[in-house]
Image (cartoon, grey):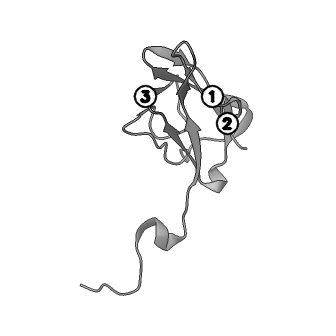
């Protein structure tokens, strides 16, 4: 087995995702909330954009209809989105809505994909 200087995987190819962190907190009524600038996020496949959701509470992310990612559901256990699907075409008029669920309470932000 050759363990030479060649690296493997994403690091070897120079690929580094651009990770956008979305922090989920609870308001005074224990409903989920996120920062105002995270209510609508425009992702750029050309920049290898990914999203990671974080919260001190267990959460579920559930996309309504289509998802711009390969998966439609995420949670505190599987919180990183991965890359935008290759078959997603960007448009300034198309948005992907999803629901953040914490303690049975919901919040409905959205994503767009940079054309």
Residue identifier under label 1: 110
> Around disc 2, counting alpha carbons within 10 Å, would you say few (fewer than 14), some (14 to 19), or many (20 or more)?
some
* Residue 33 placement: quadrant: top right
Whether tag 1 and tag 2 are in contact, CB under 8 A, the answer is yes
- Residue at the spot 66% in from the left edge and 33% down from the top edge: 38
Vertical order, 19 against 107 (above or below): below
Point out the frontmost of discs 2 and 3.
Answer: 3
Residue 91 x, y percent position in the rendering: 72, 37
Task: Specify the label residue 41 is tagged with.
Answer: 2
Q: Is residue 55 above or below residue 80?
A: above
Cα distance, mark 2 to mark 3?
22 Å
Which quarter of the rendered picture does the N terminus lie within? bottom left
**What residue appears at the point 43 percent right and 27 percent down from the top-left corner?**
59
Residue 14, image x, y percentages: 55, 70
| Residue at numbered disc 3 | 57
Gap between marks 3 and 1 measured at Cα: 21 Å
Q: Which mark sits nearer the N-terminus, 3 or 1?
A: 3
Rendered position, 16 above or below 29: below
> 70 left or right of 114?
left
Q: Nearer the viewer, residue 101 or 47?
A: 101
How packed mark 3 is, by other alpha carbons closer than 10 Å (few <14, some 14-19, many 20 or more), is few
Work out whether mark 1 precedes mark 2 in sequence or the reverse, and give the earlier one: 2
**Residue at the far front in the pictured view:** 28
- Mark 3 vs mark 1: give the one in front: 3
Disc number placed over residue 81 in the picture, else none:
none
For label 2, the SS is strand
Quadrant location of the C terminus in the rendered image: top right
Q: CA distance from mark 1 to mark 2?
A: 7 Å
Label 1: few (<14), some or many (≥20) within 10 Å?
A: some
Q: Secondary structure at mark 1?
A: strand
Residue at x 53% of width, y 44% of height: 85
Helix, strand or loop for disc 3: loop
């Amino acid at each position: 087995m050759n363990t030479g200087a060649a690296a493997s995987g994403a690091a070897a190819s120079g690929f580094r995702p651009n990770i956008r962190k979305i922090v989920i907190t609870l308001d005074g009524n224990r409903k989920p909330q996120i920062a105002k600038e995270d209510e609508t996020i425009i992702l750029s496949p050309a920049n290898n954009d990914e999203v990671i959701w974080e919260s001190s509470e267990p959460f579920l992310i559930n996309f309504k209809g289509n998802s711009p990612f390969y998966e439609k559901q995420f949670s505190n256990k599987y919180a990183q989105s991965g890359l935008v699907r290759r078959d997603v075409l960007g448009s300034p008029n198309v948005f992907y809505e999803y629901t953040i669920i914490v303690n049975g309470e919901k919040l409905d932000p959205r994503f767009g994909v940079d054309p």
